Image (tube, rainbow, N blue to C red):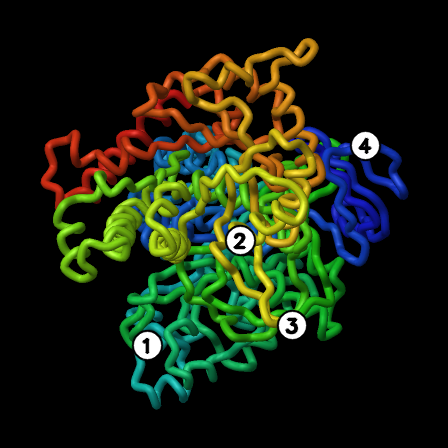
Amino acid sequence: MGNLLFKNAHVIDPSQKLDTVGDVLVVDGKIADFGKALCCSADNIIDASGLVLAPGLIDLHVHLRDPGLEYKEDIISGCRAAAAGGVTTVCAMPNTKPVCDNAETVKYILEKAANADAHVLPIGAVSVGENGEKLTDMQALKEAGCCAFSDDGVPVKTAELMREALKEAARLDMPVFAHCEEKTISRDGIVNECDVAKDLNMPQIPVSAEDVGTARETALLMSAPKNARLHICHVSTGNSALLIASAKRNGFNVTAETCPHYFIFNDEKLLLKDADYRMNPPLRSAVDQFSVLYSLIDGVIDVIATDHAPHSPEEKADFYKAPNGVIGMETSFSASYTALVASGLISLYELIDKMACKPAEILNRPIGTLKKGSAADIILIDESEKFTVDINKLHGKSKNCIFKNRELQGKVKMTVLSGRIVYNDLGDRQMAFDRLIRAIDEKKNPTVAGLDPKLDYVPEFIKKDSREKYGDTLEAAADALLTFNKGLIDSLCDVVAAVKPQCAYYEMYGWQGVKALYDTIAYAKEKGLFVITDGKRNDIGTTMEAYAAAHIGKTEAFGKTFESFSADALTVNGYLGSDGINPLLNICKEEDKGIFVLVKTSNPSSGELQDRLLGDKTVYETMGEMCENWGKDSITDYGYSCVGAVVGATYPKQLSSLRKELPHTFFLVPGYGAQGGAAKDIAGAFDENGRGAVINSSRGIMCAYKKGGFDEKDYAVAARKEAIRMRDEINSVL
């Protein structure tokens, strides 16, 4: 992990009453220093002039749907969405399948979140199975890592059980998060009780359902131990806010949250008949909207959360039948900034307090701060930037966003998690290998499938169809390659992180084969795969610029700019020195691409040159040092530069040694499987976080059907099975 130095930032930290311009130094994932014009070195210096630097946001109310409902969202995708919205800590509600009511489920969540793009704090259920019958083992849940208790999604079934929960949580010095709803009033309602709902003939939820629920919970707090802490979730009515205000005035430890949709929209949105505007509690009247807004402004409502509730597009398709819930982590800051700060209702300082510092106080954890020694959870904000929310560019799985197509102001430009950049929208840094790492993390698979399709590898039925269309021609050969590749990509796209087409196997079939290469890359990218073009290009000056433009950049013709092959990364030969690499670096910066330089290759004769000594170092060690130097100005999110290295699995000792010597260089590791490399041989390619390398298998995956006794028409099934087997084998040594 490289050290970071943010220069000339407008630093806002309400936890320290900071609102000034200065520099912030991050060392080993922690805030190391703050001041004006810091004179120190860092691996990565970020000019934050004109940007606000603040503590990462904390979302107290999120449904990650994991375990059990991962088709809606999962921990990795949810945290990726959080990072894009500046949220560095996510409190995950327990209404999953199974319910988070035991230590084993907590362990699952924390283990899966270990390498995610946000910290995840599980909330344990109040009742076993959230059925309202029996209190969970709250102490065991706390010891396992829970930050609070809640039956959110439903209210705690009985007042007696809620009373017991408050008492036990007080003993453990933990807060209880309350979903305030009297079910005998709300019954099967889905929208606010209003004239619009009547006209639409929809089941309604009166405001009294929430108000009675809030009254019950605050009354129970009054008879609970003095140190009991009650947090009221998603306040949507003015009467609930009044009850909370009364409890606060009387000295009871009650806090409250609301969500952007409750102070920005009201039930008139039902006229759109768009299920994305349906949630529970529902959008209320304009009177309640403004009551909630001003209760937030004057501090009765302490924090802004999201109640992030993903659903699939299919589930949200029918306005009347869709489940309630909207997503919100990516838009919560900008929506709140637009409604509250840009309008002049509150300051940015106050907004950061409500979205970072106050949530930390409620959790009673040392987060939401920029104090020296604290975890470097940081966001950079451009207050002036306006953007229109495009649901197709959101980072989570679900798209049920209430702010879709809406122009917002105040854009999160960078999110840093414990010193690691997990989101970057500054536009001036290389992000290729960060994208690859995120794909690897999501799929838990550091495998790249090599697409090196000799015609002999292609099943006969594919070649037969191509020959029937084009005869015995190069067109037929190229068509067969493309068909073969598409089948592999379709089968592998949710298993592997990347594919690596080798140019030679396409170029040998003339321009027709080159067209197949182009179409293969385009199809792989369409399926969301990272593409490494294996070209091993090697030249200098304008010739190398042309190679770079062709494979990872853009080409100009007739006054227009075009993408040619548009891969994400390119393998290159660095043995012409910097003259052959510098043209590539410029393209990497402009296009967010990467390169893999040949360092220690997997072939048997590699040592003839690569193992020779240059002074006290080998040629390959020297080339590795050059990779580190070439990439030193482009170290990004996960501590890796845009310059990677090709290091073979067939030389495990050298692989392990180079990993230690090249901490910022991402490895492409060939030689696994067919060339003799095994799982134990590649373990040393990875860093202490299990990252830093991608392992290539070409023939082993492509030709799996020939070895496994599969019918040739099941070639893609066989490839998938082999990729999964390889994944599991590699993960067993990490």
Residue linked to disc 3:
339
Q: How many angstroms separate mark 4 from mark 1 (CA)?
A: 56 Å
Find disc 1 in the rendering and name its residue. Answer: 319
118 left or right of 69 in image: right
In whole angstroms, how far apart are the C-alphas of marks 2 and 3? 45 Å
Q: Can residue 339 be seen in this view?
A: yes
The answer to which of 313 and 518 lies nearer the viewer is 518
Q: Does residue 611 sit above or below 202 in this rendering?
A: above
The secondary element bearing badge 1 is classed as loop
What residue is at 29 percent from the left and 48 percent from the top?
485
Quadrant showing the C terminus: top left
Marks 2 & 4, CB-CB < 8 Å contact: no
Q: Which mark is residue 550?
A: 2
Q: How far apart are marks 4 and 3 (CA)?
A: 40 Å
Residue farthest to the top, as pictured: 616
Inspect the image, locate mark 3, and give the three-letter code of the amino acid beneath it. Answer: Ala
Q: Nearer the viewer, mark 2 or mark 4?
A: 2
Q: Which of marks 2 and 4 is nearer the N terminus?
A: 4
Circles 1 and 3: CB atoms closer than 8 Å: no
Residues packed near mark 2 inside 10 Å, few (<14), some (14 to 19) or many (20 plus): some
Rendering quarter of residue 280:
bottom left
Circle 2 SS class:
helix
Q: What number is the disc on residue 719?
A: none
For the residues labelled 4 and 1, say whether their Cβ atoms are less than 8 Å apart. no
CA gap between label 1 and label 3 equals 27 Å
Q: Where is residue 345 in the image (x, y as percent from the top left)?
A: 73, 72
Which callout, 1 or 2, points at the residue further toward the start of the chain? Answer: 1
Q: Mark 4 points at which residue?
A: 41
Q: Position of residue 5 (x, y in %)?
A: 77, 39
- Graded by Cα atoms within 10 Å as few (under 14), some (14 to 19) or many (20 or more), the crowding at tag 4 reads few
Q: Which amino acid does label 4 sit on?
A: Ser
